[in-house]
Every structure is written in structure tokens, then in C-alpha cells.
């Protein structure tokens, strides 16, 4: 396809664009030439956080396809059937599989679409072709293979789905003893920096809680200090009424609502997802503390209402600087390892748009203007469709960075592309 023009070029091949590949596949006769460019060497979904006990935070029915097409051969139930685990899964009576099992499902789905993705392919920018009235753009791809060639790929539609961006506290740099949670397991499994006696885990979200629990199990000799900005972990609200905020219909309510309505939705319901922890993990951690209090062997401590301000490296020592709001005090302590489970920034399309960015219109607040079909509003020069899977929290609401709505959203994007193609 060197000089051909693809109908769809997906940038990133995580669950969102995998779900789009399925939606395109299931259009049958209305076939579209599509390719997905992924910088990783193979399909991988937050591998750095695939800690063994971690469970999904969404029902298995909110998989890659079911909410769009309950008959899909790419559903989680089809996967269970294919690998002979459907009966056992049902007997387990749990809506929430482990992240490891869901990862295996994603790999299984991907293996049936092996003609769609290109791996080790990092998109570095997008540009208009020299002939300005063309109906396609050129995607600049850098090969991550040693000696691999960089290339240009032509597209009539782009779907950007490059995922969340890890966020470190201001002024804190990653190094061999200061990690972000997104790389946690990968670095932990290859750690050869000596015995870990004092570990600090920063944050009060799901990542922080899972890492504290994991380290408490895996490094029995270590003292773990959990640096909590709050008084204690707060529970993720996944109760039935609040959960409706993730329904496909909630996207319409959010998109069509006033700014005041959007702000209120965030304010009331951000505790379904941000800076919160699953009930089961909170109870497990509390039980561990209780047991330690009973035995007198304390190695898990919680620095409440405390924020990380900086990390200094002096020879082999890592000095952690914090501020305690309770004590109104700044102080330092030593650690062999600091894990910053300090969250993520939303997907930033500008990272791959390159030259094309100036043709994408923004609102008064500086955010991209996005149509209901997830297409960026663009200037007249650009005849190609640029769609977003992620980075639309300001227009489409809470599901933007999550799995809950990917099946329906991918279907809507596929429909929009097909409709525009027919109208051409
Ligand atoms: P995702 O980040 O998965 O994929 C983006 C892909 O783009 C990556 O593979 C990346 O390598 C690639 N990429 C980036 N830049 C590129 C470039 N320039 N060129 C080529 N490729 C590029 N949500 C939920 O609803 N339920 C859950 O259980 C969880 N669990 C969960 C666990 C953890 C540890 C995290 C951090 C997050 C979650 N989430 C979640 C939220 C999470 O955003 C969601 O699960 C999906 O990862 C979203 O899928 P995407 O495909 O949009 O992004
Ligand atoms: P998060 O929910 O954004 O939490 C980040 C935490 O870091 C917050 O408590 C934040 O506090 C704190 N923080 C930031 N800067 C700090 C500082 N300088 N000092 C102390 N604390 C600081 O991020 P996350 O836990 O990584 O979760 C991100 C997403 O991934 C969520 O959607 C979550 O559900 C998902 N996730 C899912 C799983 C799973 O499926 N099992 C596992 C992990 C994550 P403030 O809010 O006060 O800034």
C-alpha cells in the first residue's frame, strides 16, 4: 500500500482503537482500508501495572464490542468460550475479571486482526501533502526497529488514540530510584539496585493502593510509607445510580449540556474514577494495618494529608521532601525507592498532530472544538477527518479516557467515517 491512501489510519493500538478495528471489520461489505500504527512491539495494555491481583474497574460486558453488537465474535464471552473458561467464569460470580485475564482477552482479539496493526511504528507528526487540495494527509512514522526505515502513510481519516500521559509532581524527575506507576512492574521485575528497605509510594488513587499492597506482599523486609494527600483512601463510587454516568446516553447529556451542567457532572461524579480506590483493596490494606498493630511488627505507615514536594539524590541516598498539612510542617525522609502513583494528564492530540495542529480549531479556553461524532473541528484547508478516542473530557465527559463506552464510540466513529465517504 506504499502509495495508496488508507480510508482510516489509527494512531495507537490500545483497547480503544482495537475496538475501532473490530467495528470496521464488522461492517462487512462496506469494507474500508485501515491500518493502525502502534509504537510498542506488540499489543500491551498498561503492562507496567499488570499486578497479579488487580481487577478490572468495569464490567466484563463493557468489552470491545458487546454494547455495540451483542452478537460480536470479539466479545469477552466469545473469548471465554474459545479458551474453554466460560463455565468457570460464570461460577466465579464476579462481574470484574482480573486485569491479567482482560489483557489475555485483548491479545486474543488482536490476534484475529493481525492484518490491521503495524508495531514498532511511532507517529511523530502529520502534515498536509504538497498538493494542498488533496483529500488526504501524510502521517510521519518513525520505525522503532534498529535500522528500520521511517515512512509516510497517507490517510483520508485519522483516529488518534494515544492514551493517558503519566504525570509526575512538579519538579520531580524520574530516575533509577524514582518511578512513575505506569512503569512500576516493568522496573520492579528487572530491579538490580540492591535491597529495598524503605519504599515511599505517593498518591491516594487506585494505582497507589495496588502498588502498596503488591510491595507489602513482594518485599517482606521493606518498610513502606504511603504518602497520602488525603486523610485516608476514599472509595470509588461504583454504585448503580452513579454508574449511569458511564452509560452511552450520558455522553449526549454531557455533550448537549451547558458549561454549568458539565462542571456539575464532574464535581458530583469524579469520585467514580479519580483519586479513589476500590472497596476491596481499601479493606485489604486496612486489615493488614490492623494485623501489624496487633503483632507490633509495623512496616506499613501512612503519612496523612501529606504531599510530595521534591526528591533529592545525594550519592546513593534518595531524600524525599514532603509537606504535612496536618502538622503544617515540611520535612525530609530517606527512601531506597520512590514510586509516584500521581496520576495522568488526559490524552494530548497535539503530540502527534504536528503541523496539522494549526488547522484544528480551539474554543476560548484553548481546548479543541470537537463534534458529537468525535471529529475535530478543522479549518477549510483540511479535507481529511481527524477523530479522537480520548482527550474529549471537556466535550464528551467522563468516559473519554475509559473503557466503558469504547464499543459504542468506535461504532459511532466508524459510522461517521462511512457516511462522509459516501457523501464524497
Ligand atoms: P491506551 O493508553 O490503552 O493505548 C494507547 C496506545 O497508543 C498505547 O499502546 C501507546 O503505546 C500508543 N501510542 C501512544 N503514542 C503513540 C505514537 N506517537 N505513535 C504510535 N503509538 C502511540 N479504564 C476502565 O474503564 N476500566 C479499567 O479497568 C481501567 N483500568 C486501568 C488501569 C490502569 C493501570 C490505567 C493506567 C488505566 C486504566 N483505565 C481503565 C483507563 C485507561 O485509559 C483505559 O483502560 C484504556 O487504556 C484506554 O484505551 P486507549 O486505547 O484509549 O489508550
Ligand atoms: P489518580 O486517580 O489520578 O490518583 C493520583 C493520586 O496522586 C491522587 O490521590 C493525587 O492527589 C495524588 N497526588 C498527585 N500529586 C501528588 C503529590 N505531589 N503528593 C501526594 N499525592 C499526590 O491516578 P491513578 O491512581 O493512577 O488512576 C488513574 C486511572 O487509572 C483511573 O481511571 C483509575 O481507575 C485507573 N486505574 C485502574 C486500575 C485497575 O483497573 N485495576 C489500576 C490503577 C489505575 P490529588 O487528587 O489531591 O492531587
Image: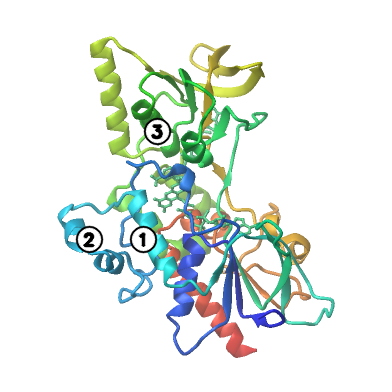
State the separation of the CA atoms marked 1 and 2: 12 Å
| Image quarter (top left, top right, bottom left or bottom right) of the N terminus | bottom right
| Classed neighbour count for the residue bearing mark 1: other residues with Cα under 10 Å, few (<14), some (14–19), many (≥20) | many
Q: Residue 290 falls in which quadrant of the image? A: top left
Left or right of 266? Residue 148 is right
Please determine whether, in this image, residue 27 is positioned above or below residue 282: below
Q: Which residue is mark 3?
A: 209
Q: Which residue is mark 1?
A: 105
First in sequence, mark 1 or 3: give its number: 1
Left or right of 66? Residue 370 is right
State the separation of the CA atoms marked 1 and 3: 25 Å
Please determine whether, in this image, residue 218 is positioned above or below residue 240: above
First in sequence, mark 1 or 2: give its number: 2
Q: Is residue 273 at all visible to an observer of this figure?
A: yes
Q: Identify the secondary structure beneath mark 1.
A: helix
User: Along the line of sight, which residue is nearer the eye, 367 or 69?
Assistant: 69
Q: Which residue is mark 2?
A: 85
Amino acid at each position: 500500500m506504499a502509495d495508496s491512501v488508507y480510508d482510516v489510519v489509527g494512531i495507537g493500538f490500545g483497547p480503544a482503537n482495537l475496538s475501532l478495528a473490530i467495528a470496521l471489520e464488522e461492517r462487512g461489505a462496506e469494507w474500508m482500508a485501515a491500518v493502525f500504527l502502534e509504537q510498542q512491539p506488540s499489543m500491551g495494555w498498561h503492562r507496567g501495572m499488570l499486578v497479579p491481583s488487580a481487577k478490572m474497574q468495569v464490567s466484563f460486558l463493557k468489552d470491545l464490542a458487546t454494547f455495540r453488537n451483542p452478537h460480536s465474535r470479539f466479545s469477552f464471552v466469545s473469548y471465554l468460550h474459545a479458551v474453554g473458561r466460560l463455565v468457570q467464569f460464570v461460577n466465579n460470580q464476579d462481574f470484574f475479571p482480573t486485569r491479567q485475564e482482560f489483557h489475555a482477552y485483548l491479545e486474543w482479539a488482536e490476534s484475529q486482526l493481525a492484518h490491521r496493526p503495524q508495531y514498532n511504528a511511532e507517529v511523530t507528526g502529520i502534515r498536509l501533502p504538497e498538493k494542498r487540495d488533496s483529500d488526504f494527509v501524510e502521517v510521519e512514522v518513525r520505525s522503532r526497529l534498529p535500522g528500520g526505515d521511517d515512512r509516510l502513510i497517507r490517510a483520508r481519516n485519522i483516529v488518534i488514540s494515544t492514551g493517558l500521559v503519566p504525570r509526575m509532581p512538579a519538579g520531580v524527575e524520574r530516575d533509577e530510584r524514582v518511578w512513575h506507576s505506569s512503569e512500576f512492574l516493568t522496573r520492579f521485575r528487572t530491579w538490580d539496585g540492591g535491597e529495598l528497605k524503605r519504599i515511599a509510594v505517593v498518591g491516594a488513587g487506585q494505582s497507589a493502593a495496588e502498588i502498596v499492597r503488591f510491595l507489602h506482599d513482594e518485599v517482606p523486609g521493606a518498610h513502606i510509607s504511603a504518602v497520602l494527600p488525603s486523610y485516608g483512601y476514599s472509595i470509588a463510587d461504583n454504585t448503580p445510580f452513579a454508574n449511569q454516568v458511564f452509560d452511552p446516553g450520558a455522553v449526549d447529556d454531557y455533550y448537549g449540556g451547558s458549561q454549568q451542567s458539565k462542571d456539575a457532572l464532574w464535581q458530583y461524579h469524579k469520585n467514580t474514577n479519580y483519586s479513589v480506590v476500590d472497596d476491596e483493596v481499601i479493606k485489604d490494606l486496612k486489615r493488614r494495618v490492623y494485623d501489624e498493630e496487633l503483632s507490633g511488627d509495623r512496616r506499613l505507615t501512612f503519612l496523612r494529608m501529606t504531599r510530595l514536594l521534591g526528591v533529592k539524590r545525594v550519592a546513593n541516598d534518595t531524600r524525599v521532601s514532603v509537606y504535612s498539612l496536618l502538622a503544617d510542617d515540611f520535612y525530609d525522609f530517606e527512601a531506597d525507592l520512590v514510586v509516584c502513583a500521581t496520576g495522568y494528564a488526559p490524552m494530548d492530540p497535539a503530540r502527534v498532530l504536528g503541523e496539522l495542529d494549526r488547522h484544528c480549531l480551539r474554543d476560548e479556553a484553548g481546548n479543541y472544538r470537537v463534534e458529537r461524532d468525535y471529529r475535530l473541528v478543522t479549518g477549510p484547508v483540511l479535507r481529511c477527518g481527524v477523530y479522537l478516542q480520548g482527550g474529549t473530557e471537556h466535550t464528551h465527559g467522563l468516559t473519554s479516557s475509559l473503557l466503558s463506552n469504547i464499543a459504542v464510540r468506535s461504532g459511532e466513529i466508524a459510522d461517521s467515517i462511512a457516511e462522509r465517504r459516501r457523501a464524497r
